[in-house]
Image (cartoon, rainbow, N blue to C red):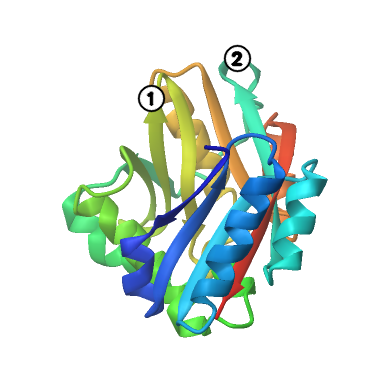
Amino acid sequence: MPCSIEKDNWLSSQIGKVSYKLFFKEPLIERNKNEIKYWIIKNQNKEIFIYSKIPTKTVEITALLETVGFKLIDTNMKFELDRELITRKNIQRDIQICFAEKMHQKYVSNIAKNNFIHSRFHLDPLIDNDIANRIKQSWVENFFLGKRGDQMALALVNNEPIGFLQLIIKNKTLFIDLIGVDQKAQGKGVASAMIQFVDQNIKHTCIKVGTQIGNLPSIKLYQKLGFEFTGSDYVFHYHS
């Protein structure tokens, strides 16, 4: 089927309303468009949240989502780095990088809760900022619970965690799932140090990452490290 709607139980528990992800797998035919419209109309009186990420080139799907009440929240910029092309950056001597352990959970949780402003949840005016913060906090806590992510790098200064990089690993490709740096340590090369650490310490063929179009510091970081732009997706949200 060209499209499907799947319930997201974890996000439902975070947002406080039943949440779904809308997938598109191939060009739509008219029947599929009508199915989506019917599903939205049937559920518009319920408290629900739906999100969908689609390539920016899919004009037909963009028009359909806007027609049924979806709002464009963000544009996700995708970058990829060939392992042999990374540009090495000097790391401050007081920054230590290691792999995260269970004892670091509390520190990482606090960094995730208090230092994100560009995520799609923070950009959505219909999602309370406290909820958006809690989503990021729960996101990294799931790593320590074994529910999300395969590896995490940690940056420390004087043994105090100041940043984390959460990874999903598939077929020797490293996907940066979430990266966060404490505000007091931003702009000091912490993110670069963590990316270089995983590049050197985990066998892989490439590193992939997505970031918000408005997150200019992240975009500049990836470009300086040698990441190449590979495409973009629109991120749509629907509330009722």
Q: Position of residue 122 (x, y in %)?
A: 58, 73
Where in the figure is residue 35, as x and y percent of width and height? 58, 55
**Nearest to N terminus: mark 2 or mark 1:** 2
The answer to whether residue 118 is left or right of residue 240 is right
Three-letter code, disc 2: Glu
Q: Decide which of 103, 27 is in the foreground and name it.
A: 27
Mark 1 falls on what kind of element? Answer: helix
- Residue neighbourhood size for the residue with mark 2, other residues' Cα within 10 Å, grouped as few (<14), some (14–19), many (≥20): few
Residue 171 in the image: above or below residue 196: above
Looking at numbered disc 1 in the image, what kind of residue is underneath it?
Asn
What residue did someone put label 1 on?
Answer: 201
Q: Is residue 135 visible?
A: yes
- Dividing the image into 4 quarters, which one contains the C terminus? bottom right
Q: Give residue 202's quadrant in the image.
A: top left
Res 3 → quadrant: top right
Q: Residue at x 38, y 42 (%)?
A: 97
